[in-house]
Amino acid sequence: MILLEVVDAEQRKVAASQANDDNVPTRRHPEPTQPLPPPPPSPRLPDYATSQAQAEQQDGVKKSAKQGDRRLGRAVVYALAIYLGLSAIIALPLFLVLRGKGNQPPVSTNPQNWVKSSNIPPDQLPPDVLNLPSIYGQPIECNNWTHVNASGTLDSFYQLSYLIPSNETIYLRSNFSDMEDDTLSPVDGTLLVSVTNDTSQRDAIVSVHMKDIGEEALKEANVCLMRTDSGWGLAIYVPDDANEDKYYLDVELNLPLPSGPSPLSGLATYLPSFNQTFKQLDSYMGLGSFNVQGSLGNINVESVHAQSILVKASAAGISGTFNSTDRVILETILAPITANVSLYNDGLNRGLPGFMKVETGNSNITLNVTLYGPSNNSDYCPPTFVSHLRTFGGALEASYRHDPYTQPASLFVHAVNSLEPAQIFVDSKFEGTYDVHATLADAVLDRDTDLVDPTGAGRQRTYVDDLVSANRAYGWAGWGARPTGETWNNGQGHIEVVSSLSAAILQLTDAPNANLLANKVSKAVFSQTFTSS
């Protein structure tokens, strides 16, 4: 019963509180908050192997990030350096050009003043010169003329000169060397090449004198200093449609005395209508190449030493003294060739003999050839020489002698003529076969048996005839017995002399007999002198 009374008391309290709601403020209990989610389960620590792998992976990620940052930094630095470099390359020349133009006076538009000026801007070089073939090189300066007035018997002329380094190749060239054969060159003149005696001169000096034939002709001619990959040169250019005036130029090249480890390596000229004269050039012993070409002007060389020598003309003569360690080529068509030639061969490489080729058309060939090689007591292989001679309408006469201190060489000669006699002389050191034949004339073999053995061994001079007839004789000449088999090629050579309408003559004597050629071979087919008993 007590429980019921307690319940009733509580109900009466609730009713009383509801009756007083209008006078008493209501208190609200806060709404219950949402229950927190249960905490996650405690992580389990990995084992040792797993923790090591995770650590290495994290290190790799960090290193990759660092390397990426480094590469990005380097790329930025390189890009900045390239930008600065290009800016300098472009901006600096532009600045210098603009500054130079600002400091230079304006170029005269008067052609006469322009060609006589001493400082021609590179962009003002003549168009005809800029269009020259690349073989001419790059023009450096053109038409730096000075006018010289007439004086006494001398006519007025223009002159210029350039200094050229002499430790490379030097060439002198006219564009008319590239023209067709039927084009008559409007350029004529002379060339003189010499070596100075002045020990203070360090560079080569090339000077040009041009006859004064009027301002219009002067404007059409261009004489330029040229630069090539291998040296320096002088180019003379006259347009194909030049006026009817005849240009006459005197060109002189004065070389310094050789000095230093790099002397002149080559000398070349291409001057069709020039008479070309070369003084003693023996002081340039190390000259690699000597190349001279012309057409209507004579070519005379007092003396030159070079590894390779080439001299060519067409309607002009060739003369001089030529000394070569490799090859000598002399060619013309309508004029004679007269030369003293010295050939050197060390015998170390039998595949590279000393070589000589001499050809002309309707004129004479006169040669004196001296052969040089290892000494008589040397253990080297014998020196080897190959020679080709040919003419058509002139006499052919050539003598071959060994230097006294040179061992017998393997000498091969092929000499051919058509209308006139061909005569070859070889000294007593020659050993080998010979073949002398003519088509409509005599084959003459002139030989001596009383010659002295050049080796001092006291051997007898021997001749073996394989065939002797009116127009042909061939056989062998030498000392002692004729070699056979493997011993045949030991210093043996071969001489062939051929002519069509005149005599073919071979002299195996102590000295040449000029009467044979002078008398046009009015003697027996074969003559031989024997030692008197």
Image (cartoon, rainbow, N blue to C red):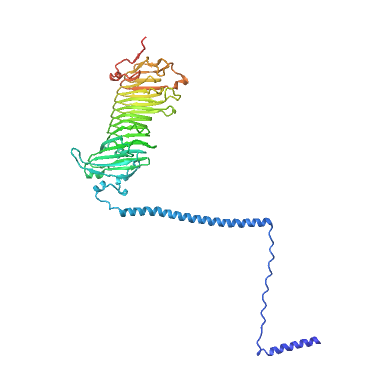
Can residue 133 be seen here? The reply is no
**Residue 166 on image: x %, y %:** 35, 38
**Residue 75 on image: x %, y %:** 49, 55
From the viewer's side, name the closer residue of 227 and 482: 227
Quadrant including the C terminus: top left
Dividing the picture into quarters, in which one does residue 500 lie? top left
In this view, 12 is above or below 132: below
In this view, 44 is above or below 134: below
Quadrant including the N terminus: bottom right
Q: Residue at x 31, y 54 (%)?
A: 103
Can residue 91 be seen here? The reply is yes
**Residue 43 on image: x %, y %:** 68, 63
Extreme residue in the left direction: 152
From the viewer's side, name the closer residue of 246 and 347: 347
Extreme residue in the top direction: 533
User: Left or right: 409 with respect to 523?
Assistant: right
From the viewer's side, name the closer residue of 124 and 8: 124
Dividing the picture into quarters, in which one does residue 286 lie? top left
- Looking at the image, how many numbered discs can be counted on the residues? 0
Dividing the picture into quarters, in which one does residue 339 lie? top left
